[in-house]
Image (cartoon, rainbow, N blue to C red):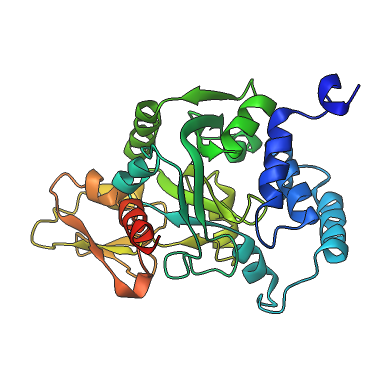
């Protein structure tokens, strides 16, 4: 009797492994790393956040194994924080674009997005069965003793990732429709949380999830605030019309990036700190704030436009 018949290897594990074999520059270490990340996300994230009591020992073992199995590439920055960001990062996407990402109904392959995703690794959008969407209890929130609610806000989009999570985390995940996913995105946006499209090298060097993040719980925010530049701006910056601003301070209260200051009873947005999430735009009761394209902030992730460009190339 083989391992599959004994149930020792789940179907989604095999699918994930086979997809890894078809992925360029995807090593055995990457597969083992990705398997651990998907199989035990709550343990993985609690260690990464420093919330697990054994995190120092576990991180030392992980880094040692990585040094043996996957030496640093010549084109990767030497600074540990930048090397980590190259492998795991999130792109801020305004609410409308986040909804488009969970509305795709056809397989797509968009590779090497250097302009949109300015990192040396994990910059592809390759979606198989994108209509398969799983909502997962947020590992970052679950790792915190006093966390934000609700917890079922992480959206895993497409296979092999979504089916893997559903099979391995049946008590903390469920299959949802595109409409339900858009409802979760809107509800989190209304709470003032920020949608990020996440990319990870161990996730086949591609986009795999939309996380709805708050600065108090999110590990990506924690890493970014500690000097690891793993969050990318949306490509937009928010601007205030001072003639319309009434100084109510609502925008500054909801800004997850602490980019808004009240000066002379008017909202002042520090553009260097603004990530263009658009939360303040919808929170302003006077419609005094708008998002505007900002060339200094890179190119937005506009999935419909990227799909059209990919179709023309192919």
| Horizontal arrangement in the rendering, residue 240 relative to residue 243 (left or right) | right
Residue closer to the observer: 143 or 45: 45
Position of the C terminus by quadrant:
bottom left
Residue at image location 38% in from the left, 64% down from the top? 313
Q: Is residue 27 left or right of residue 113?
A: right
**Front-most of residues 111 and 43:** 111
x 63%, y 32%: residue: 165
Q: Position of residue 27 (x, y in %)?
A: 76, 58
Quarter residue 26 falls in: bottom right
In this figure, what is the number of numbered marks? Answer: 0
Provide residue 141's location: percent of width, then percent of height: 58, 37
Of residues 275 and 100, the one drawn nearer to the viewer in this rendering: 100
Up/down of 295 relative to 153, above or below: below
Residue at position x 34%, y 40% from top? Answer: 99
Can the viewer see residue 40?
no
Residue 158: x %, y % from top left: 52, 38
Query: Could you say where residue 137 lies in the image, as x and y percent from the top left?
Result: 57, 30
Residue farthest to the right, as pictured = 1
Residue at the left extreme, as displayed: 243
In percent of the image, x 42 and y 65: which residue is there? 116
Q: State which quarter of the image contains the N terminus.
A: top right
**Residue 122 in view of the camera:** yes
Front-lying residue, 81 or 124: 124
Residue 258, located in which quarter of the rendered image? bottom left
């Amino acid at each position: 009797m083989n391992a599959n018949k004994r149930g020792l290897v789940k179907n989604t594990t095999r699918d994930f492994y086979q997809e890894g074999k078809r992925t360029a520059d995807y090593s055995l270490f990457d597969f083992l790393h990705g398997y651990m990340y998907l199989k035990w996300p709550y343990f993985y994230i609690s260690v990464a956040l420093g919330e697990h009591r054994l995190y120092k020992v576990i991180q030392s073992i992980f880094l040692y194994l990585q040094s043996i199995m996957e030496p640093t590439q010549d084109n990767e920055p030497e600074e540990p924080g930048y090397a980590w960001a190259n492998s795991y990062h999130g792109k801020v996407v305004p609410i409308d674009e986040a909804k488009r990402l969970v509305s795709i109904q056809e397989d797509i392959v968009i590779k090497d997005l250097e302009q949109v995703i300015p990192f040396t690794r994990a910059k592809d959008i390759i979606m198989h069965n994108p209509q398969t969407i799983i909502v997962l209890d947020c590992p970052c929130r679950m790792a915190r003793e006093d966390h934000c609610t609700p917890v079922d806000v992480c959206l895993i989009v497409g296979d092999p990732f979504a089916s893997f999570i559903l099979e391995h985390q049946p008590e903390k995940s469920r299959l949802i429709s595109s409409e339900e996913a858009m409802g979760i995105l809107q509800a989190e946006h209304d709470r003032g949380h920020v949608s990020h499209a996440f990319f990870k090298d161990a996730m086949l060097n591609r986009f795999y999830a939309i996380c709805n993040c708050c600065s108090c719980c999110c590990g990506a925010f924690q890493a970014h605030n500690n000097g690891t530049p793993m969050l990318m701006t949306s490509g937009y910056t928010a601007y205030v019309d001072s003639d319309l601003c009434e100084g109510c301070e609502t925008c500054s209260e909801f800004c997850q990036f602490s980019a808004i200051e009240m000066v002379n009873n008017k909202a002042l947005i520090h553009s260097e700190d603004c990530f263009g999430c658009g939360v303040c735009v919808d929170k302003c009761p006077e419609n005094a704030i708008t998002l505007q394209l900002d060339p200094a902030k890179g190119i937005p992730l506009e999935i419909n436009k990227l799909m059209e460009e990919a179709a023309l190339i192919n």
